[in-house]
Amino acid sequence: MLHERGVTVHHSTIYRWVQKYAPVMEKRLKWHWHPKFGISWQVDETYIKVKGKWVYLYRAIE
């Protein structure tokens, strides 16, 4: 979304945003979201080639 608006952001900046704001969002959404016991989420970071250019891909893994 940022790239579509002409904003360039390094992948490590986005990763730091996730680390900083994910706990805040979890606190605010905790009343609405009741996770099942034993389920954890992790973020996977992969480096892939798209149209001849190497880019980072972040995905949520259950």
Image (spheres, helix red, strand yellow):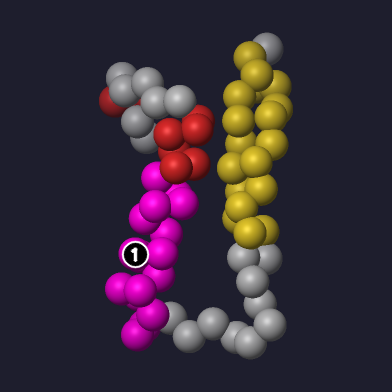
Please state, as top left, top right, bottom left or bottom right, where the C terminus lies in the image: bottom right
Name which quarter of the figure residue 22 lies in. Answer: bottom left
Relative to 62, 19 lies left or right: left
Determine whether 12 is above or below 52 in the image: below
* Residue 13 within the magenta-colored segment of the rendering: no
**Residue 46, image x, y percentages:** 69, 36
Residue sitting at x 62%, y 65%: 41
Q: Name the residue under label 1.
A: 24
**Labels in figure, total:** 1
Name which quarter of the figure residue 56 lies in. Answer: top right
**Residue 16, image x, y percentages:** 44, 42
Residue sitting at x 48%, y 85%: 34
Please state, as top left, top right, bottom left or bottom right, where the N terminus lies in the image: top left
Q: Is mark 1 on a helix, strand or loop?
A: helix
Q: Is the magenta stretch mostly helix, strand or loop?
A: helix
Residue type, numbered disc 1: Val
Relative to 22, 54 lies left or right: right
* Residue 20 within the magenta-colored segment of the rendering: yes
Determine whether 44 is above or below 38 in the image: above
Determine whether 21 is above or below 17 in the image: below
**Residue 45, image x, y percentages:** 65, 41
* Magenta region: 17-32
Residue sitting at x 35%, y 85%: 31
Residue sitting at x 65%, y 19%: 54
Neighbor class of circle 1 (other Cα within 10 Å; few <14, some 14-19, many 20+) is: few
Residue sticking out furthest to the top: 52
Name which quarter of the figure residue 25 lies in. Answer: bottom left
Q: Which of 58 and 13 is in front in this view?
A: 13
